[in-house]
Image (tube, rainbow, N blue to C red):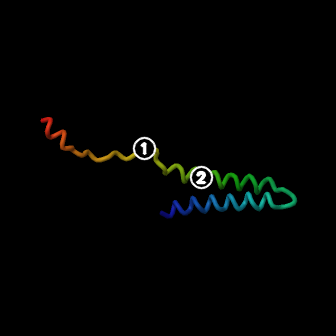
Amino acid sequence: MKKKWLNYVFILLGGFAIFIADAKDRKDDYILIIGIMLLMFGLYRLTRGISNTKPEAPFVKSETDEEAI
């Protein structure tokens, strides 16, 4: 559970760094790059735990199967 919150912290810190780097009069490229890296790292870690496979439904024997036997 703590790892999931850490991912959200990375995403929020990255977004905040991007916002701060873009809001200044003089654009700071290094802060912008670090913000993008934190954002992408957090998104990568978050989506790594998501599975694209659907859980299999348990086998349910229907009444028609019993009649066929």
Location of residue 42 in the rendering, given as x and y in whole percent from the top left corner: 60, 55
Q: Is residue 24 above or below residue 68?
A: below
Image spot of residue 7 (x, y percent): 57, 58
Residue density around tag 1, few if under 14, some if 14–19, many if 20 or more, within 10 Å: few
The amino acid marked with disc number 1 is Thr
Badge 1 marks a residue whose secondary structure is loop
Q: Quadrant of the C terminus?
A: top left
According to the image, label 1 marks what residue?
Answer: 53
Q: Where on the picture, by quarter, is residue 20?
A: bottom right
Question: How many other residues sit within 10 Å of disc 2, few (<14), some (14-19) or many (≥20)?
Answer: some
Count of residue discs? 2
Mark 2 lies on residue: 43
The picture quadrant where one finds residue 11 is bottom right
Marks 1 and 2 sit apart, C-alpha to C-alpha, by 19 Å
The spot of residue 12 in percent (x, y) is 64, 61
Residue at left offset 55%, top offset 52%: 45
Label 2: state its secondary structure: helix
Image-based side of 1 in relation to 31, left or right: left
Which label lies toward us, 1 or 2? Answer: 1
Where residue 18 sits, quadrant-wise, is bottom right
Q: Is residue 13 left or right of residue 52?
A: right
Furthest residue toward top: 68
Name the residue type under label 2.
Leu
